[in-house]
Image: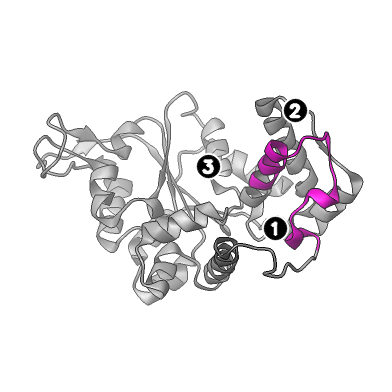
Amino acid sequence: MVALLKSLEKLAKTDATVLLLGETGVGKDIFARKIHENSLRVNKPFFKVDCAAIPENLVESELFGYEAGAFSGANSKGKPGCFEMADKGTLFLDEVGELPLIMQAKLLRVLQDQEIMRVGSTKPKKVDLRVIAATNRNLEGAVKEGTFRSDLFYRLRVAVITIPPLRQRNDDILPLADYFLHKFNGKYRKKMSLSDEAKLAFQNYTWPGNIRELENLIQSLVVTRDKDIIDISDLPNNMIGVKVSAENKTLSEIISDVERDLLQKALATHGSVANIAKLYKVDRTTIFRKLKKYSLV
């Protein structure tokens, strides 16, 4: 991680486009913000867009904005998009691999020409911003499949940082746990810490949801436990190797367990919200909402 952080600090001083790669939950948004905070744009806006969370029919208006009367229901004064709001600063495009092909072409134009065009406008507008993109997808594979533009792929990979999953960063687990304990102890006015047994369980667990799973677990423990020491008995059964049967569980709880397991396996196998939505024949926003519900993204 030391070498990774040094690379990050070095890249931050340039104005190059950065592509962050890594599994869901490894902390790509944290690294993106770190790049911004160490850049010459530190005092300008940092704007994050979750490309997977925007319905496909709203992507263009959200990113590029629109003019007054551009479409039915549009604001009478028009609206700036994310590119305009991040002007002079940094725009972080999370899950860029989920952008529809037509939006990929428009993003390529922004990267090449530093200009955008609002929906309903005929006049291009110059913008000055740095773009940091992130994905958990294999973009090279997506290019071969025809779901991601090759010209955009090569434009994005000016500076690539691959963030390893938490299971490969064992030395980071306890410092991160302490960081989140400090954060949520302060927020909820508590003084909780981990027992030695709990610390060992944290280090031995594989953390499939990575940093996001760790953060959500710590928050849950701080909120729901009254004692100051978090013991191994307070941890979820899947962390301590206990298999839980369906006995004494409601139908809703059993369905949730099965759904979480299916989504976790699908994410590991298919790698993107779009692919999972296609697999289960539902809308992308439905899959994204459920992944957030189970702390898988």
Q: Residue 11: which quarter of the image?
A: top right
Q: Are marks 1 and 2 in contact (CB under 8 Å)?
A: no
Residue beneath disc 3 = 32
Q: Nearer the viewer, mark 2 or mark 3?
A: 2
Q: Is residue 205 in view?
A: no
Height in image: 259 above or below 231?
A: below
Relative horizontal placement of residue 191, taking residue 47 as reference (left or right)? right
Give whichever of discs 3 and 1 has the lower sequence position: 3
Q: How far apart are the two marked residues, 3 and 1, measured between alpha carbons?
A: 21 Å
Residue 228 pos. (x, y %): 83, 33
Q: Inspect the magenta stretch and tell me whether residue 269 lies in it.
A: no
Height in image: 64 above or below 244?
A: above
SS of the residue under disc 3: helix
**Count the marks: how many?**
3
Residue beneath disc 1 = 207
Residue 175 pos. (x, y %): 78, 41
Q: Where are the magenta residues, as a range?
A: 216-240
Disc assigned to residue 190: 2
